[in-house]
Amino acid sequence: MPWENIVGLCQDMFSKMATYLTGEPTATSEDYKLLENMNKLTSLKYLEMKDIAVNISRNLKDLNQKYAALQPYLDQITLIQEQVAATSWMHIQINQKQSARS
């Protein structure tokens, strides 16, 4: 009787071990498929990000060109502001001198 019990337990153990060992490569294969899919998706995302970066670079270059084209006008505005400030200062000085004479 004890031998029959031991033999039965051994057969059960070997059966379960065989099931586990045949299932292990399947699980590993599924893991590799999952990793492969993740790598493909990541690659696509990096391509999208590259396209976005190229567009940003192109737009930045365009903005820099537009700014360079506007620079002479901005310089003129700065010069006019300086002239207005100088004229305003002279006006204040003249008014102070006239007030002092009165």
Image (cartoon, grey):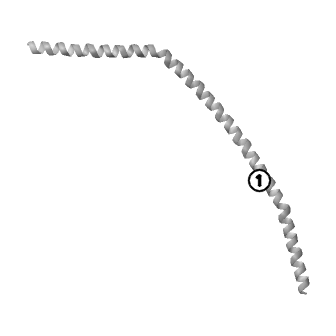
Residue plotted at (78% across, 49% down): 33
**Relative image position of residue 29 (x, y in whole percent):** 81, 53
Q: Quadrant of residue 94?
A: top left
- Residue 5 lies left or right of residue 70; in this view the side is right
Locate the N terminus and report the quarter of the image it occupies. bottom right
Q: Residue at the left extreme?
A: 102
Mark 1: few, some, or many residues within 10 Å (few <14, many ≥20)?
few
**Relative image position of residue 30 (x, y in whole percent):** 79, 53
- Residue 72 lies left or right of residue 99; in this view the side is right
Residue plotted at (75% across, 45% down): 37
Locate the C terminus and report the quarter of the image it occupies. top left
**Relative image position of residue 19 (x, y in whole percent):** 85, 65
- Residue 28 lies left or right of residue 96; in this view the side is right
Residue type at mark 1 is: Asp
**Relative image position of residue 45 (x, y in whole percent):** 67, 39
Q: Which residue is mark 1?
A: 31
Above or below 76: residue 49: below
Regarding mark 1 in the picture, which secondary structure is present there?
helix
Residue plotted at (83% across, 61% down): 23
Q: Residue at the bottom extreme?
A: 1
